[in-house]
Amino acid sequence: MERVIDVQHLSKTFGTNEVLKDIDFSVNKGEVVSIIGSSGSGKSTLLRCINLLEKPTSGKIIYNGKNILDHAHDIYAYRTKLGMVFQQFNLFNNHDVLSNCTVGQIKVLKRSKEEAEEIALKYLKNVGMEKYIHAKPKQLSGGQKQRVAIARALSMEPDVMLFDEPTSALDPEMVGEVLKVMKELAESGLTMIVVTHEMGFAKEVSDRVIFMDKGVIAEEGTPEEIFNSPKQERTKEFLYRILKEV
């Protein structure tokens, strides 16, 4: 299996607070890895360290065989290879849908406007938003905004897609439309790392599930192993609490 990202002994400290402690995990090409855990367990910080929105305190992130934390590495070139979808969509409010999906391609990847629009339209169609290309974000529902955000990230044609709780800011009836798009992306063979509290998605769609607790990876395994026969007491308690609320 081709390894895309390999995180080794990663730690992150904010002041005296060690948020991530000695994290080790890897992601193979075409794999969907879901990261679950309570609020404050370090899930989102881990994702932000992988794309260097936060600088790790120590450790390595190996991408295609090279440690991207080496000073010689081009961080901006690396970031273009990672698509990021945030909780709060982070769309450009003064741009319409199409422009939201082309501006990064034109500025960062130096594509022509025509090429960028062609690629953007392809991905907007994939997420069912091609009818809204002239709409501004304020005219869209939360679910529609998140689908545009996914299309925008895909338009950069990244090697890996990172999702940080992509449904947590959505009304319940909109969650399904975003999860459906993500499920289709997973089935298309896209490499995905997903921080999520949607246990159904983690169970159905993931190849592997990582359970984080207090800044460490407490347990990792297939969805079958994690959900049906977790080994750690902390994992059992978390799942019991979460699944009881559903």
Image: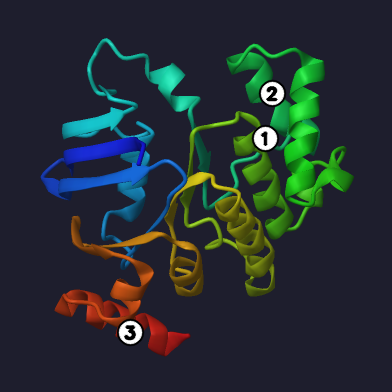
Residue 186, compared with residue 115, is above or below; it is below
Q: Position of residue 120 (x, y in %)?
A: 75, 32
Q: Position of residue 222 (x, y in %)?
A: 33, 66
**127 horizontally vs 132: left or right:** left
Considering the image in quadrants, where does the N terminus appear?
Answer: top left
Q: Position of residue 36 (x, y in %)?
A: 35, 64
Front of the two marks 2 and 1: 2
Q: How is the image coloured?
A: rainbow
Which element is circle 3 on? helix
As rendered, which of 23 and 184 lies closer to the eye? Answer: 184
**163 horizontally vs 63: left or right:** right
**179 horizontally vs 79: left or right:** right
3D distance between C-alphas at marks 2 and 1: 10 Å
Check disc 1 and give the amino acid type. Phe
- Name the residue tied to disc 3: 241
3D distance between C-alphas at marks 3 and 1: 37 Å
Q: Assess whether mark 1 and mark 2 are in contact (beta carbons under 8 angstroms).
A: yes
- Name the residue tied to disc 2: 103
- Name the residue tied to disc 1: 92
Q: Assess whether mark 1 and mark 3 are in contact (beta carbons under 8 angstroms).
A: no
Which element is circle 1 on? loop
Check disc 2 and give the amino acid type. Val
- Earlier sequence position, callout 3 versus callout 1: 1
